Amino acid sequence: MGLGARISQEKIRNVKKLSQQAFAELFELKRGTLGAYEEERSEPRIETIIKIANHFSITIDDLLTQELTVNKLLKFKDDLALQGSFHKEKFAEIPCITPKTEADYILYHDKPHFIEDLPKLHLPVDPDKEYRAYLISNLEMTNNDKAYCPKDVVIGEKVDPNDFTKIDTSSLVIALVHGKVLFRKFYYSSSKIILRANNTNIEDIEIESGEIKEMWHVCYTFFRRLPENNTVEIEQKLNFLEQEFMKLREKF
């Protein structure tokens, strides 16, 4: 371990008020083994050095070569009483399509290594489901100042291609189609899928389900501002009316 590590180890034990036995148990060592390390009668395995460094948030270089001060040690992780007694919760990692990665996403959306390198959002959602986040960069889903604006984020759950036509009318989707990533409202009519923007100046896109490379049913939205309650209620009522209108249209 070397003189620097031996001194650091002893100083860590003293600052943390740990006996050799407590320190040894913490890292699954025998007391005699720890004593041999401190007296430089034996060299520890690299795994043991890494465990000590990681536990106390000390770089391996500092542990091996530096004489650590008490002030530094007091900043390291402590509270050994909690060791192993608390639950570490891990949120789901959700790859996010951003304006900077969108062009590459269109080309490499089916490459696992590319998806792994995308920026990630960590959220308390079902980790067994596959999600994709999309950072909005345009005004295509904006028809007033309270709609979906640049820097808002939408998150969708992956839809199996066989289930494209089962999505509810006027649902929000993220779709990869015709060499573009689109955030739109979804409609299904006369065996055609219609992707519609909120912005009335943008034409509908009418396609066959086979033309869609990927589709994600939006289930979470994150706004950079707090939406007004009455705006949410109006949006819900409009969605309901749109669904009823599409049902009537199918009958005639």
Image: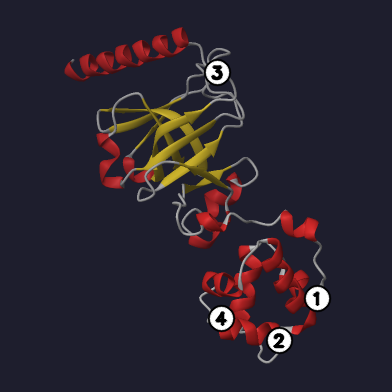
> What separation in Å lies between label 3 and label 4 (alpha carbons)?
58 Å
According to the picture, the residue beneath numbered tag 1 turns out to be 65
Element under label 4? helix
Of 37 and 128, the residue lying toward us: 37
Which is more N-terminal, label 1 or label 2?
A: 2
> What separation in Å lies between label 2 and label 3 (alpha carbons)?
62 Å
Which is more N-terminal, label 1 or label 3?
A: 1
Quadrant holding the N terminus: bottom right
Which is more N-terminal, label 3 or label 2?
A: 2
Residue 120: x and y in percent read: 55, 48
According to the picture, the residue beneath numbered tag 4 turns out to be 31
Of 150 and 110, the residue lying toward us: 150
Of 142 and 30, the residue lying toward us: 30
Task: Single out the mark in the foreground, 2 or 1.
Answer: 2
Residue 250: mark in rendering: none
According to the picture, the residue beneath numbered tag 2 turns out to be 39
Q: Measuring 78% from the left and 60% from the top, which residue is drawn there?
A: 70
- Image-based side of 165 in relation to 36, left or right: left
Task: Decide if residue 178 is in sight here.
Answer: no
Against 233, is 187 above or below?
A: below
According to the picture, the residue beneath numbered tag 3 turns out to be 226
Element under label 3? loop
Picture colour scheme: secondary structure
State if disc 1 and disc 2 touch (CB < 8 Å).
no
Residue 85: x and y in percent read: 45, 55
> What separation in Å lies between label 1 and label 4 (alpha carbons)?
24 Å
- Could you say which quadrant of the image residue 168 lies in? top left
Q: Amino acid at mark 2?
A: Glu
Which is more N-terminal, label 2 or label 4?
A: 4
Task: Decide if residue 207 is in sight here.
Answer: yes
- Callout 1 crowding tier (Cα within 10 Å): few <14, some 14–19, many ≥20: some
